[in-house]
Image (cartoon, helix red, strand yellow):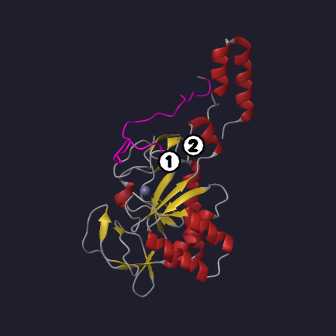
Amino acid sequence: MASGARADERTDSKLASTPTAAAARAADEPALPDGSISCGSANRGALYNGARMPDRGFGWVTPQTWSKRGVRYGTDELVGAIQRAARTVAAQYPGSLLGVADLAKEHGGAAAGHRSHQSGRDADLLYYAVDENGAYFAPDNVMPVYTRHGKAYYSRAPTWQKRIPVRYFDLARNWALVRALLTDDVATVQAIFVSRRIKVWLIDYAKKTGESPELIHLARHTLAVPRHVQAHDDHMHVRVECGADDHKAGRCRNDQAPSRGKGRKWRWHMRCPWTPRRPGA
Ligand SMILES: [Zn+2]
């Protein structure tokens, strides 16, 4: 969200008074952004001026397990997209709350339990659930694992629990969430990671309820089943694309940083590629 006028002004004055190398650097350097900047890749990156996802709002809640971890920051696009999608689902199905788990740390970088989530473009969302009578089941402090018939009775994260209150995958709300994310006006969703089985359920549901072929095509390509990462049978992982400002100021990359070998995670802290200057500094 760099102001073009501001960038031009500064570039002009620098060009007039400094040697060529410094002028070239100045021309490269973007003006101080007003909004968030995602830097680097999702698996090796940082976040500047990230937005904090509020713990509660119209249509969503962050259960305590995640709110106390503090991994709650994202780009303006990501945080906005989650709020707008949760609101859309709650408007369609009154009383629904989307469970929002981890996003990124305040300045991004490696977060415990995640390989990506480093640059503010990733978020984990709990699937909407219903009870055995089809009544809405509010998110609690676990990630229920949805088994073959959509039934969940145990969890793997954040801790292994052999027995949790039984619930079922809520097709209608989960599809409404995917639909809202895919049709967001501001953010472009790059991928929604789900398990193979859940992708089949969602696409079948979309066809059965008469969604347009264009939307189904988009869902087919955006719902992704990762090869190496653990199955997303207990949460949905949403990644938004780099925005124009992220590309420009943060060297944001939609592709992953090359692996360190044997699937090891990038751990050291990467800084955003430029040092932001405060106005007047
Ligand atoms: Zn995730």
Q: Is residue 278 visible?
A: yes
Residue highlighted by disc 1: 120
Q: Which residues are magenta?
A: 256-280
Does the magenta run of residues contain 259?
yes
Q: Is residue 197 above or below residue 39?
A: below
Q: What's the residue type where badge 1 is placed?
A: Gly
Q: Is residue 263 above or below residue 179?
A: above
Q: Nearer the viewer, mark 2 or mark 1?
A: 1
- Residue drawn 58% across the image and 49% down it: 76
Does the magenta run of residues contain 30?
no
- Residue drawn 43% across the image and 49% down it: 116
Q: Is residue 27 above or below residue 69?
A: above
Residue 190: name its quadrant.
bottom right
Q: Quadrant of the C terminus?
A: top right
The one of 110 and 7 positioned closer to us in this rendering: 110
- The circle drawn on residue 36 is 2
- Residue drawn 58% across the image and 28% down it: 278
Q: How many marks?
A: 2
Percent across and percent down for residue 70 are 39, 49
The one of 66 and 15 positioned closer to us in this rendering: 15
Residue at disc 1, secondary structure: loop
- Residue drawn 39% across the image and 64% down it: 231
Percent across and percent down for residue 260 are 38, 41
Percent across and percent down for residue 238 are 51, 59
